[in-house]
Image (spheres, coloured by chain):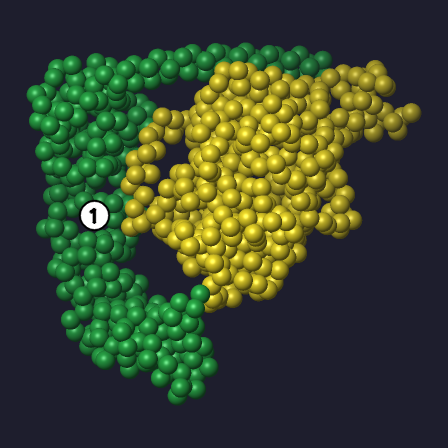
Amino acid sequence: MKILHYSMLFFGGVIVFYMLFVIVSYCTMLIIAMLDLRKRYRLDPSEYDDAHIDAFYSKPVSLLVPAYNEEVGVVDTVYSLLNLRYPQTEIIIINDGSTDNTLQTVIKHFQMKPVNKIIKTNIHTKQVIQIYESEIYMNCILVDKVNGGKADALNVGINVSQYPYFCSIDGDSILDEKALLRVMKPIVLSDGEVIAAGGNIRIANGAKMQLGSIYDMRLPSNYLVIMQIIEYLRAFLMGRIALSKFNLVLIISGAFSVFSKKWAVEAGGYSTNIIGEDMELVVNIHRLIKEKKENKRIEFVPDPVCWTEAPHTLSVLRNQRRRWHQGMFESLWKHKKMTLNPRYGLIGMVSFPYFWLVECLGPVVELGGYIYIIIAFFLGQIYYEMAILLLLLFVIYGVIFSVASVLFEAWSMNTYPRKRDLLRMITLAFTEIFWYRPLTLLWRCEGLIRFVRRKSEWGNMKRVGIAEKEKSV
Amino acid sequence: MIDLSLDFLLSVIAILFIVLCGFMMYIFYQRQSEVRFKKSRDIYLKDYSQLWYEYLFNNEIFSVVLIPRGKPQVQAIEMIFSSYLKNITNDDMRWKMKNFSNQYLKTFYENDLMNKRWSIRMNALYRIADLQLDELLDACKKLETTKYSKEEFFQLLKIYSLFQPELFIQKIKVPNANYSESEYRRLFVLLEEDTFMRFFDEFTSWSMSIQFAVIDTAAAKKNMKYIEKLEQLLTNENDEIKIRALKGLFEIGVIENINPYIPFVTSHLWEVRLMVGKIFKYVPLSYSYPYLEQLLQDENWWVRSQAAKTIAEDRDGLEKLKEFISYSTDHYAVEMAQETIMRKQGTR
């Protein structure tokens, strides 16, 4: 009995201290993000946009769209790229051996004709079958290749690209017309000191869209999707902005990020043998920066928005979260020597420990917390109070931070202008700790188990297309 | 200890909830005021956009109803002016806007310049430059006596470049004002000819970013007056300066004498050889072919590709390439020539 008592006290203490540590970390990051956004509040961004719409002030970018079985979303994605306000781009759609009609859809829609094109092989990839060029849109290229995964498709895109910067965009994502202009801002204004930048990803389910442009933003009806919207806002306010400020970003989403081609090629391009290829590239570049002792930065840009389709069923979401977590573990494990290694500066001393402790092991400890609460309620006595203490910490961690993120986003960016939508998000945020949080924790722990068992498979999300079509779900 | 912690945590949660509730109420209130603001602005736009058009373009008499009363109307006027400024170049229109702004918008922006909030001050500085509010020059100078940000100083430089070029030259020399090339280009592109030329005269005294921006701006202006200045830079010790000067000369697109460029064919830098390959586009093939053939056999893929492209662009280029294929033993160069011919002949 004594063993049980001491182990309950020990685990309770560990979980409470861990939660306090995470709450303090998140609070700090939230404050940094708030100060940053507050400074820019009501600043007229059109001044920069109008000045940099001229090619003379910007840098040309190749837009890479890897597509595997994306026949539903790829056309809208390409239209959103054609709508971009940016002076010099080329669109490269890479069909990664799709088994559906992705290739035929793109050929038909954009009137693609086969061409002979000289490709410089910077990165070794699977075989390219044919290159096509659009007859109606200048600089719109389709590459048909043997299936090799998303990373391989992106590497082909890098080889085919002719510009010094490339931007990867998921085949199911939609970019705001000014997104590229603004994500390139730190790169242009730093004279190449910033070598990669990631944009803000938002969930598009529920939006109204026409030919790749979102014209009305509404909250979807699916609770699972709304919870993901809140989760994205949290991640954005409690992580990315603060980490970016100190050049500590390890993840910029593959759904929308810009890289210097020179650095990406030197870092070996996207790794094909790892699940989280986007994180892997960022870590590789950070490693390269430190090894070459160069003063370069990777930034997250809060403003530019890329709209993406969120999973709307539990099974798809489970698959996605499992993969994300497994990918993160793989990458951190692969570069474990960077952890607490002063040679890698703040990346080794702060970023890696943070990702290990908070992002990777977090789900295990948090899930332990939930299990602890259940056991403690059965055991009663002193543990009962410990359980309440933990529960209150979960309320701060889960509910308060979520509500604060929703409100702060409403104040600074106002993505969902309707009062009803805002109230719905706040109400749902209150329920997070009871269903959504435990579920995602469970899935992330599954990701950890899969990493340990070295299990790997491609999670192909069944898509219905962004926006309006959500009604049919 | 746990009792105390529970009480403490409960108090923290209660306080946080009250703060968040207050914040939510504030957001709702703020949204209401924004709706009222937009309504008032839109009414002005609806009622007076036509009058503005008549005044600016049809020489109608200025009506006093156009004078703004309050911030929403100022914003409406900004929107009208901005849409015309972006799309129409008309000196008379600009003069009218400038006069109107100096007379009726000055006080608004003067107050904004003294605002505590950085973003409001920045917006005011943007408008002063866009609407050419030269009467606020002194107020802008006064801003320099306060603690200003790097972004604010950039806007001040832009304003000085428009209203007092001498002061601009003086201020840009301040060592703590370091901006990116792209930002310097934004400043230089607006400069008058004489002021811009002064940057060439004192070229070596400027920072690298300024030197690069000067060359790039000269290239973008495509003015033949800069050819001589750029050719002088070809002897500069810095490789990047040489490459950019070559690029600038390529952009201007007038090559009178091939001799200064010939030494670059054997440069140790592939970027230089590439640029020469491009520049030879403006020289008759009969003069440039021996050098282009040399570049076609270059070790660098980009240089070979450019040389082939430049040859192919000439009227006799394809024949020259075919001839080259028939006698050359350089496998890579022949392959490049063949691919270029294929592309040129449209066997896509």
- Is B273 left, or right, of A449 in this rendering? left
- Say above or below: B80 vs A285: above
Picture quadrant of residue B81: top left
Picture quadrant of residue A365: top right
* Amino acid at circle 1: Val
Q: Nearer the viewer, residue B310 or B94?
A: B310
The percent position of residue A203, horizontal first and vertical second, equals: 55, 32
Q: Nearer the viewer, residue A115 or A33?
A: A115
The residue positioned farthest toward the right in the image shown: A1
Return the residue at label 1: B189
Q: Nearer the viewer, residue A202 or B310?
A: B310
Q: What element carries label 1?
A: loop
- Is A150 left, or right, of A459 in this rendering? left
Colour seen for chain A: yellow
The percent position of residue A388, horizontal first and vertical second, equals: 73, 17
Q: Residue at x 68, y 32 (%)?
A: A313
Neighbour tally class for label 1: few under 14, some 14-19, many 20 plus, Cα within 10 Å: some
Task: Chain letter for green, please.
Answer: B
Q: Residue at x 68, y 45 (%)?
A: A459
Q: Residue at x 33, y 24 (%)?
A: B117
Q: Which residue is drawn at 50% across and 15% down?
A: A419
